[in-house]
Image (cartoon, rainbow, N blue to C red):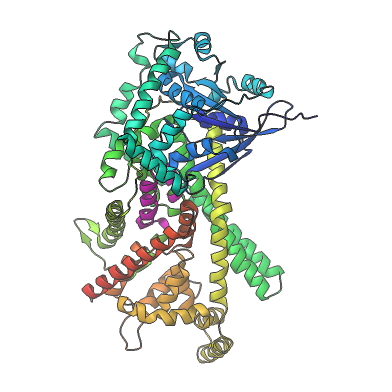
Amino acid sequence: MEKELSLKKIALLGNPNVGKSSLFNSLTGLNQQVGNFPGVTVEKKTGLCRFLNQEQTEIIDLPGLYSLFVKSADEAVVLETLIDPNTQINLLLVVLDACNLERSLMLYTQALDLGYDAIPLLTMNDLAKKRGIKVDLQELSKNLKQAIFEINPRKHKGIKELKAFLADYNPVKKEADSDFKNRLMLGQFDLMKSLSSESKKISREELEKSGKDSTDVQLEDTLQRMNTVHELLGTAINFEKVSKKNSTASIDKVITHPIFGYLIYLGVLMLIFQFIFSVAEYPMNWIDSSFASINAWLKSVLPQSAITDLLTEGIIAGIGGIIIFIPQIAILFAFIAVLEESGYMSRVVYLMDKPMRMFGLNGKSVVPLISGAACAVPAIMSARGIDSYKERLITIFVTPFISCSARLPVYIIIIALVIPEGTFLGFSYKGLSLMGLYLLGIFAALLTATAMSFILKTKDKSLFLIDLPSYRMPRWKNIGITVYQKSGSFVLEAGKIILAISVILWALASYGPTTAMKLAEQKTEEMMLENPALNKEEVLSAQKLEASFIGHFGHFIEPAIRPLGYDWKVGIALITSFAAREVFVGTLGTIYSVGEQDFDQKLVDKMRNETFSNGNKVFNLASGFSLLVFYVFAMQCMSTVAIVYRETGGWKWPIIQLIYMSGLAWAAAFVTYNLLS
């Protein structure tokens, strides 16, 4: 029989890279949930753990930070959580890094001064010994007047003993240090969402009366606390000389070298990109063919009806459009997790921070931007690792400018259509055109990022502070949990939006005004009488598409796209390709009534011969380049819109992003068409 547990909720607190996440995974396993803290995009991890025969306890993994004097809105969620009585946290498990005990104990003493019962857990002791740092646990426990547990979550050391201790632990309520709490409020009241406007006004007035700024308040507290920490350490820590063989400095000389470091990182990125671009292709093709087979089977066993069409062409196709992204998401986050677990990611951030700041970004922005060349969806999700809200938002905003693999079918068919054969310096015109499109997207991303860094007004200062942890073998359990969480988050959150938009697009493309749809059938019969060799299903599909609501909308927007060199048929393809960019080619194939044999070649020929009512060619060098430039800049992907909504926590930024990119695409395509006409 389970007995009631006094520990209803435990929070994990600690500096970054001290093993806190590994401890959380050891305690909760897959029995955890990942969401966002209210108002910010930083992840909130909660899970359940059972201590022996007790009922389940909720575990909260708070984001890593160095001090409760926080510097950003994302860090402020930790302080908000700790001072909010509604969270009802009974106990804090404070993870101490044996290699940086002074810094860890600073945070521990702050937790105590907030009135929390806090148990210190010592990690990284094996690494500390290799560095010549000896920690006397018995002496330190005596000084802290609190038992200390030595744990190694990566090797599951000490976890069993910790669980046994917590099974019978009764938390002790303590009084908070009111002076410290006041200093915290004075130091960062602007970041505290829970404070009322009146409370912030009072705090601002008190700070002005003191004649100090928030930095002064923090500095005074830190100096006082350092004296306390030195007293607590006493003789509990000793330093010895160690052999240089135990140091990672020699490896870092190469990894962070101003030349070789970038070459190594470029090689790593190429490996990641190659896996995402090529290895993911096999499971993605399998998923695609599997859903196609399911659809074909359902159509063969179900009666022809609107319900069957909704199920196969709307719902099943929509689900397939969600599931097909999972291989790319899984591979990307598996690589990122390996780089983080091994300690290499911290070196990458250190290496890339300076050049990225020239464009309003930081070192962590590199991974999303490069990954965007495969798919913007997992790339935008990977921006969660960027601490600064402003820099993360800019990264999310500009990542879709990087040409993804879904644009390739559009690029290839238009380039084949309008770019002549020939070479320049040994490189084909077509190859150079494709490379130019990718470079144009990168240029637009960096230029937009620079502009946004000046436009966005925020007090979220990006201070470069990073640990360079020791190199270590990745813990595969952590990697597996990360991949599982990220994939599940996409399917459950963004997937709902993608499915809804898929069904809406299907309905708009399948139905239209009754009179117009009947005329489409009549026109099909007339065309078949004139030319019986035509494929009736293809002709009927093209006629119904033109007569549908989305076809009417294509005619409606034609005046807006004619200045770009497009007709209403291209307009329909632009609309339907919002479901996925590569749909552009398939839509044109349907609307031009192309047969199944030699599909690509016939489509190119049909597009080449397509004319306006005045006899002018629709596709020429000017309109072709206009269309290419449009697709470089346009959002044109509902999955990206959905994931931006998911990551920013609302519709504000995805709408701004969609309007900006669409407007820029139209303007750039307009200029391109008129310059080349």
177 or 6, which is in the foreground?
177
470 or 184, which is in the foreground?
184
- Which image quadrant for residue 90? top right
On screen, 89 above or below 511?
above
On screen, 152 above or below 555?
above
Q: Is residue 235 left or right of residue 417?
A: right
Tell me the chief SS of the magenta region: helix
644 or 511, which is in the foreground?
644
Is residue 275 among the parts visible in the rendering?
A: no
Q: Is residue 511 magenta?
A: no
- State the residue at coordinates (50%, 92%): 530
Extreme-left residue of the structure:
425
> Percent from the top left, x then y, of residue 40?
47, 47
Q: Is residue 164 left or right of residue 558?
A: right
Quarter of the image where the C terminus is located: bottom left
The region drawn magenta spans 380-405
**Count of labels shown?**
0
Q: Is residue 207 left or right of residue 642?
A: left
> Percent from the top left, x then y, of residue 330?
51, 45
465 or 310, which is in the foreground?
465
- State the residue at coordinates (71%, 74%): 303
On screen, 210 above or below 410?
above
> Percent from the top left, x then y, of residue 216?
32, 31
Quarter of the image where the N terminus is located: top right
Is residue 436 among the parts visible in the rendering?
A: yes
- State the residue at coordinates (54%, 61%): 498
